[in-house]
Amino acid sequence: MRTELASALRVRNNAGIELANKKVHAPSPEFAPIIQNHRARSSLDILLGQTIDLGIGVLTRSGMVNANLNPCGIDTTRAEELVMKGKTEILAVKNLSHGRDVARARALLSEFTNTLITLRDIYRGILVEVDLPHSTAHGVLSVARSLDVTASQIGAL
């Protein structure tokens, strides 16, 4: 159809231009829902990918906070368990999303959100119960806030 339209435009054949226009636009109502569905899926894939990256990032920071808390004599066993659990959950979400199992990925994201909230609460408890050096306390507070923000963003999906 491209050559037909190009020829009609070159010789300024209005009837040919009109015919090419009808050929191009006739199937478009059939393709519109397909294109819309593809765009929605692509947006969801992008959003899910960003969420996965955010989750991995906040868990990495949590691991670093745990390493900083150990020299202060704080038992981080439960926090470390939650970091490992969260990493397992978010990687499973990533695998499910690549397999296009969006329903199971969303369900697992809900579990992941609960893990983040529990981890956040552990860090808040540490901040209340233990007199930490300023820089360590600041790092713990920063990660607790990041866990809270990440959990909220996932909940908004």
Image: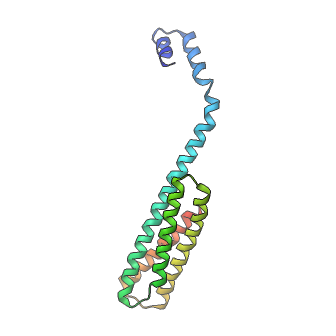
Give residue 117's position: percent from left, percent from top. 55, 75
For residue 26, which quarter of the picture? top right
Percent x, y of residue 149:
51, 68
Q: How many marks?
A: 0
Specify whether residue 157 is in view.
no
**Residue 56: which quarter of the image?**
bottom left
In the figure, 72 relative to 24: above or below?
below
At 47% across and 71% down in the image, what residue appears? 146
| Residue for point 51% across, 53% down | 98
The answer to whether residue 124 is above or below residue 56 is below
Above/below status of 124 relative to 13: below
Query: Does residue 142 appear in the picture of this structure?
Result: yes
- Looking at the rendering, in which quadrant would you find the C terminus? bottom right
Q: Give residue 62's position: percent from left, percent from top.
A: 43, 75
Tell me where residue 140 sits by quadrant: bottom left
Q: Measuring from the top left, give residue 49's x and y in whole percent.
A: 48, 56
At 39% from the left edge and 84% from the top edge, which residue is drawn? 69
Which residue is painted at 55% across and 11% down in the image?
Answer: 16
